[in-house]
Image: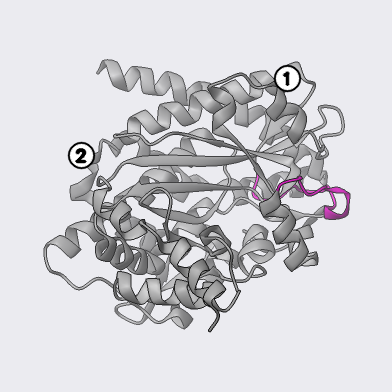
Amino acid sequence: MSSTGDQAAATLLAGVAERFERSSDFTVGIEEEYQLLDPGSLALVSRFEDLRGAADEPFADRLAGELISSEIEVKTGKNDTFAAAAREMVEGRLQLIELAERLGIAIGITGVHPFSPWQEQQIIDTPHYARVEGELGYIAWINNTWSVHIHVGVQGADRAVAVSTALRSVLPELLALSANSPVYLGRDTRLHSARTQIFTRSFPRCGIPDAFRDWREYADFVELLARTGAILESTQIWWSVRPHHSYGTVEIRICDGQSEAAEALAIAALGLACVAGFCRDYDDGRALPAHQRGVIEENLWRAQRHGLEGEMIDLDRGVARSTAAAIEALLMWSEDRHEALGIGPFLAPIARMLSEGNGAQRQRALLASTGDPAAIVARSVARTRTSAQEALEAMKVVATQ
C-alpha cells in the first residue's frame, strides 16, 4: 500500500461524512442533459464551447459539459422545495433554448440520438473527460447518452448510505417509467432504453452497486478504489444511485432524459418520494431493503428491454407483476410523503404515462408510422420547448390555487 494511495483515499473522503451530517433533508436539485442539434438536418453538432461561451452569468454557472461537445447539462441549484427546483429546471430549459437559437443551434432531449453516429462526436477538452477517454477509449466514445439526474438532501452519513442501498431496489421502476431511447443508429433496437445498454452496462463502477450497511462500509470501499488506483475522484463512481460527496445528497442517475418537461418532473418527484419514504422507514426503525444485486439486475433488464410494457419481480414476495402495478405500488407506499413534499401535482402525469405510454412507446410508434428517425428528433425539439412552456403555465396555475 503506497503513501500516495493512502493520501488519495484520504482526500476523496475528507469532510464528506461531516457534509452529510450538516445536510438538510429533502432539498432538491435536478440536472438535465440536452442534445445540441443542427436545425436543418437535426443531426448532433459539436457546439458546446460556443454555447457555454455565449452564456451570461449567473446562467453560465449552471451549464456544464458532459463528455461530448454535442451535449450540455443544465443544473438547478439546491432548492428547499420540489416546486422551486421544478420552476428553476423549466426556466433553465427555456433559457437554454433561447440562447441556443441565437447561435443557430436546436435543442432536444431523448435518451440517445436516434441516428447521429458516435464516430462523428468529439470529446470536450477538460482534464476530467480527458482521463475518462484515456482510460476507457471505445467505451467513452460510444457514450452518446442523455439523462436526468435527481439530487435529494439526506441528513446523516449512515442514513444516506442506508437510503442509497434501499433505492437500488426501485431503480428498475424509475428506469421503466423514464425509458426514452428505443431508436439508435436509425433502427428500433427492441430495447426501450438503449441508453442503459450504452452507458450503464458499459462503464465500470456503473449500474447497481453493492448493498452497503453504513457509512464505514461504503467509505472502506471508496478507500480501496483510491488506494489501488482505480479512481482519482469520487465522480468516477458512476453508479445509478450514489451518495454525492460534494453536495451531501443522494443522487439518482438511472433515468433517461425526457423531451416532455412534465414527465421529467414526474419522474424526479417519484424519485424524491422514494427517498422520503425510505427515510421515514429508517427513522421509524423499520429495516430497509437490501436485496441481492442479481435479482435487482433482472428487474433492470426487464425495464431496459420492455419499459412499461413488461413485468417485474416483486422482490419481497418473489412473484411477477406488471411494471405498471410495481410503479403504482411505489406511489401508494410513499403517498403519506406527497403532501408534505408538495409533489402531488407533479406526480399526476404518471397515471397518463401508465395508460397512454411514455417516451419510448411514442418513439417506437412514430418510427413505425413514418419510417424516419429524424421525425423523432423533430418532435423532440418541438416538445422540449413547448412542454416546458406548458409546465411553467401549469405551475403558475397551481401557485394561485
Looking at the picture, the colour scheme in use is one colour
Part of the protein shown in magenta: 110-126
- Indicate the position of residue 109 as horizontal and vertical percent values: 65, 39
Work out how far the residue at label 2 is from the one at label 1, CA to CA, in angstroms: 38 Å
Q: Secondary structure at mark 1?
A: helix
Q: Name the outermost residue toward the left.
A: 284
Q: Which residue is drawn at the image coordinates 74% and 35% (left, top)?
A: 48
Dominant SS type (magenta): loop
Residue 308 vs residue 233, the one in the foreground: 233
Residue 248 vs residue 211, the one in the foreground: 248
> How many numbered dots are placed on residues in this image?
2
Left or right, residue 281 beside residue 224: left
Q: Which mark is residue 389?
A: none
Residue located beneath label 1 in the image? 101
Q: Which residue is drawn at the image coordinates 29% and 34% (left, top)?
A: 80
Residue 230 vs residue 288, the one in the foreground: 230
Q: Quadrant of residue 394?
A: top left
Q: Secondary structure at mark 2?
A: helix
Q: Is residue 273 magenta?
A: no
Left or right, residue 295 beside residue 128: left
Residue located beneath label 2 in the image? 339
Left or right, residue 96 beside residue 303: right
Amino acid at the residue labelled 2:
Glu
Amino acid at the residue labelled 1:
Glu
Above or below: residue 350 compared with residue 18 = above
